[in-house]
Amino acid sequence: MRRLLVIASVMFLSACYNAPDPGSGPSGGGPGSLAGAPAPSFDVVRTDGRPDSLARHRGQVVLVNIWATWCPPCREEMPALQRFARENAANVVVLGIDQGESASVAQAYARERGVTFPILVDEKQQYGRAYAAPGMPVSVVVGRDGRVVNGFDGAMTLEQMRAFVAPALKQPQHGSV
Amino acid sequence: MSARYAALAVAGLAIALVVAQDVYPFTPLYHTWQYALALAIALAVVLAYANAARRGEDGITGKRLLVAMAGAVIVDVAGLASGLLGPDTGSVIGTPGTVVPVPALGAAAFFAPVDDAALARGSSGVTLRRRNAGEVALAPAGRRVLGESLVYLEPRPAAYVDAFDERGGHLTITQPTNASFLSPVLLFRERQRIGAFDVPFDTFAAPARHRIVRALYFTPRELAQFSHAGAAALAGKDAPALILTAADDAGKPLGITLAASGQSVALGGIRVRATIGTYPALAIAAAPATWALVAGILLFVAGIVWSAIARKPERAGGLGENSVPPRTSQREGDGLGEAGVFAPGTPAPGTLAEQSCTPIVPDAVTGGFASVPTT
């Protein structure tokens, strides 16, 4: 009987222990947290109406830039991004993915600023959600194997862009899918 | 006898308490000390009876009930383990198209992307990707047991928002105060009290036009209580609606309007269209191991049935362990046992004595008449 009382007491005291919460919300993490994961891709259109998506560029190193015309840091970053795209046209695809705006707005802005790399129009903001953008701009570099190499939250300088993309360019080409 | 029934009642109650974890999950009760104490007391009672029964204090019925008690112990311990060690009851709310780690399950939950049509249907699901295990796709209203956890998709109010400028150009939607900055899906994680109502609300911005919009979710029942013609009309359609209020960046109010699902409304210089529906949250609760529940309940029932079989002859006047054995030693050969059964020495039914219509008169009754000498 004494043994039973001890067991009951231990269980009673154990009942006061609170197990950890299963997680009451997303962990955040930002775009960098996706490194190594398959890069999400969605079918959208370019400003000229042609269909495009990240998946269509599989086998190439892609620098994805998530932005919008109203976003001041995005506008500040745009000249550096344009220069980077021109410098690396042979080995890096730069995709600007406008979030939530109409094609006409994005196209007018690109024309005005002399942007020549492809601008994709993502009215449903699917890329921004999938890459866990905590703000804009957000840049993600995707390797030839279609996996995220790294992510960056905020505007980058040209030097930062070069350093950011370099690891993806060092990846072996035979690993491409 | 009363100890036996008390132990059976307590065991049955404990099993019912544990089964309730599966039938009525997502109740914080299972993690309270009171629940654990009740199961611990039940366990102590069952073990105390089992110990006495093992020593033979409740005869053969008690020994056979040991099987039932073993089943009750298995269920009880499974219930205690899941209550004490299993995950707390909680919900994981994920933005559509995102992956949310769920440490309690050792998994990542992938919340399916959703468009306005899918949100209106409430057809979105969640996929759990577990380490060293396969994917588990959860459909709306489906529930699954994963280890010590029960998972279930709980539909929650949601709205897919589109905003347009005065020329019809699409505007970016942001949620600066929420986990997913660029999601156009409002998940109404917060609640606000307005008079008698306690309603879910969410906030989004249209930064291109410097507008911040607050959306309050009202059910048809709540709408019916409004003294407003538009609200009454919407309540009649049995559909929820949003009350939208707009402000500029400085917080200056710019307007308020009622919006039905899919209806485009003008507000603070922009147009807003909200498609109202549901999007699932991943609800997690502790659950006793299924094998333990099944095995324990089977043993419990089997033990009771077995003990009932043991007692059946007793009720029929047979040789159950509680019946009084026929006394044959004192009146051997008198033809009748005390309980009216045929005892050793009694002529068997169908023998000459029975068929002769001559009553068999015990010696004790005849009192030795046969020996009275005739004169």
Image (cartoon, coloured by chain):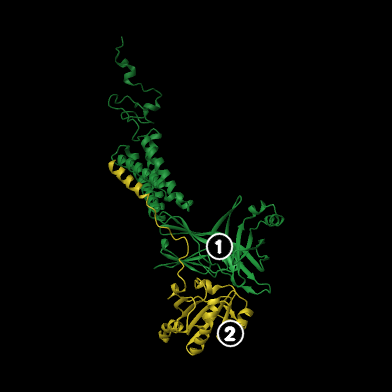
In the rendering, at what x and y percent does residue B227 appear?
A: 69, 52
Which mark, by number, is residue A12?
none
Residue position marked by numbered label 2 in the rendering: A113
**Is the Cβ of the residue at disc 2 closer than 8 Å to that at disc 1?**
no
Q: Quadrant of the N terminus of chain B?
A: top left
Q: B138 or A25: nearer the eye?
A: A25
The reply, left or right, for residue B368 in relation to residue B239 is left
Cα distance, mark 2 to mark 1?
Answer: 37 Å
Residue A117 seen: yes
**Tags 2 and 1 on a common chain:** no
Colour in which chain B is shown? Answer: green
Q: A107 or B72: nearer the eye?
A: A107
The reply, left or right, for residue B220 in relation to residue B2 is right
Query: Is the residue A150 above or below the residue B85 in the image?
Result: below
Residue position marked by numbered label 1 in the rendering: B187
**Chain for colour yellow:** A
Dot 2, how many residues are within 10 Å of its Cα: few (below 14), some (14-19), or many (20+)? few
In the rendering, at what x and y percent does residue A15 appear?
A: 37, 49
In the rendering, at what x and y percent does residue B205 appear?
A: 58, 67
